[in-house]
Amino acid sequence: MAPINTSPDYPALDSAAQAWLDDFAADPLSALDRLLMGKVWLGGYAAAETSNALPQLLPTALLGWLKQQLHTTEAPPGVNAKIYAQALVDAFALLQGFDLPQTRAWCIEQVTGVWAWLKVQAAFRTRDPRPVFLRALALAQLDRKLLPFWMMLCRHGVREEADLALFGLRRMPKDDQGEVERGLPRALIQGFLDYGRTAARGDDSRKKEWLAEVDFLTAVYPMRRDQWAGAFREGMARRSPPKRLRHWLDERYPAANQESPRANRAAPLKAPYWNDEIRPLLDRFDHTPETVSPALRAKLDEHRHYARETGDSYFLTRTFRQLGEYLLNQALGTQAMRDPEWALDLGQEATLWEPSDHHSWALVARTLNALGDWTRARAVFWYARRRFPHNPFSHAQLGHALAMRDLVDEGEAVYRQAIRRFPDNPVCWADLAHTLRVAGRREQALAVCREAQVYFPKDQVLACGLTGVLIDLGRADEARAALDRAYQVSDASEKQQRTLADLRRRLDAVEARQPLPWKHPFLAKERILGDFASINSLVGIDLCPMPALGLAGLWRNANELQRAQSELQGLGRFPASDVERGLILVPSEGWAVTRDFFQNSAQRYPGDGCTQVHYQRARVRAGDQVNVADWNSLRGRFEEYAPVIRIEQNPAATMPAALTDDDAGLDEDSALSTWMYQAGAGSRRDLVEEDFLAARQVA
């Protein structure tokens, strides 16, 4: 072991420090744990910063200690939250101050997992491990692996995180060989614009915040005003931001919103476009896949190059999932999927770049299911339902998949709960009826169609669905009347007319006593194709408990409390399972007992915003007086929960104007907030609030 520096700047090595060094040599992991947790005395070194007092023998010990911490969601027994927060601060400060390549590589490889874990740890104004971790990552970069992570933080729009994400983009090497970026990185401009897109959907107070970041950026990279205007102009040319953000930029660089005065300016880097460059290849894929596939892969590499150069993953994500859907479908004239394994790779890569894109998650889940990997598919379906509760598609995909795997009761319950959340959406009814029909429960499907027609008498999809079920049941006279009604309410679109023609053909066959054969869905035999590691790494949390958590909430909302409790029996204690256990108490024990339960959970998980908000909600419903300062403090710590906090403070709170801008192009998080504001009063508001909180907890 290298000796501690005992120069005049350091105290002499005394017996207490030597005793700890001996312990460290014998059991580094345990000795480091005791030191970071403040359980040892270092004698003359006790007053020194931990990162300055430690010897050089750290690589294995620090890595092992961090891995050990990642297995728990709360502070170790006997260690209070502030001491534990300081321990984490010291640990990541060591990563900045020492050359620890193994620990650095592990943190970068597991970045989503470490970040998700850190987000639920206690943090204090002077002891917050998260910025120390982000700073350590930014300083440790040897390649461009962290680009998707930095862009994700920019899109989240939390100022403290975005600051350090932008620092990470500034410090990122130009390429994977570690070459230093000499000029202004394109990805940095994209990060600023993505951060601005999110800020522009808040209130006007965020303008000053974003412009302050612009001023800082222009101070770090001193260039002429026309050069800065050109840089922003190029970034906005790739994907136009909302008008509100353009107006903000006008206050600093109005020329960025105008055409460049130079006629011979260089064209900005552009991504390949689907219709121009991908679609023509797909037209030939089924005939000559062996020649088209390499050309497609070359185009995908162009997308990757564009995303890595610019930080803009918008086109990559949409192209990859569109191609994945194509590969998941059957080739012309066959019953075989084109290439589901490739589709899975594309879905996972798209999700890595934009984990808040619900279409990509749906592709991953459906592909796993099509390949027979139901265990992982089920977990991903339930994750998507929890992460995107505002999107009826997430409910429908889950409900249909469950029913097709012979879990029809669960699938129907998912649809019934979706109908509660989206009472004005006929699609939920139509999908429920279709799923029951395909599952062979046609009398139940008929009952759903008739019930839905009471609420949506002019919906063409429901009218066609009713006709189809009656044809399946052989009830020709009723089917003929239903088909006449379907013609009356249908539009003239080619797709709808094809549907009507198919129904008429099937009905004619039934009346001729020659019914057409029913096409039964085929599902691959169940098999395990891999573990959860690759899927968990996309979001940094364990997806294994998602089905149990989802079913617990499903049966709780259906007031089947025993079934809800049984789903939680196999789960340990962690923030999400505690929330479900707390909410199960409400119908049987009341809000006072629930409040006490959430108080305990809030103390157990002080860094988890979802648990903290649930505690305050329970206090309100139990009749406690909750001060404005308590709510404001909560919002200051957990800005992502602001819609619920605002509505809890004032049920009449209106939606921020930025969420209603026609040009805003709402992302999933903004759409989730919009859904929250539109929930209205009564029991549905509570249902939507609980969904919102659960979604933010796993984001």
Image (spheres, rainbow, N blue to C red):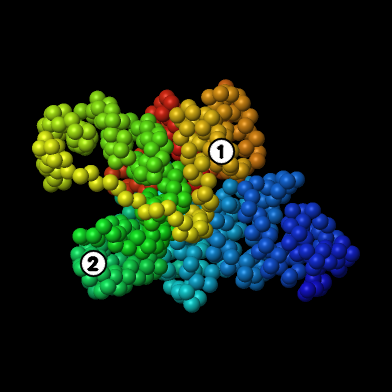
Q: Residue at x 74, y 53 (%)?
A: 37
Circle 2 packing at 10 Å, graded few (<14), some (14-19), many (20+), is some
The N terminus lies in quadrant: bottom right
Q: Position of residue 392 (x, y in %)?
A: 34, 40
Q: Residue at x 65, y 72 (%)?
A: 99
- Residue 350 visible from this viewpoint: no
Horizontal side of residue 389 vs 326, given as left or right: right
Circle 1 packing at 10 Å, graded few (<14), some (14-19), many (20+), is many
Q: Residue at x 73, y 62 (%)?
A: 29
Helix, strand or loop under label 1: helix
- Reading the image, the residue beneath label 2 is 285
Using the image, tell me which numbered label, if any, was put on residue 308. none
Counting residues from the start of the chain, the first of labels 2 and 1 encountered is 2
- Residue 495 visible from this viewpoint: yes
Q: Amino acid at mark 2?
A: Phe
Front residue of 496/656: it is 496
In this view, the residue farthest toward the front is: 513
The answer to whether 238 is drawn above or below residue 689 in the figure is below
- Reading the image, the residue beneath label 1 is 568
Q: Amino acid at mark 1?
A: Leu
In terms of image quadrants, where is residue 317? bottom left
Q: Position of residue 273 (x, y in %)?
A: 26, 64
In terms of image quadrants, where is residue 285? bottom left
Front residue of 349/499: it is 499
Q: Position of residue 583 (x, y in %)?
A: 54, 31
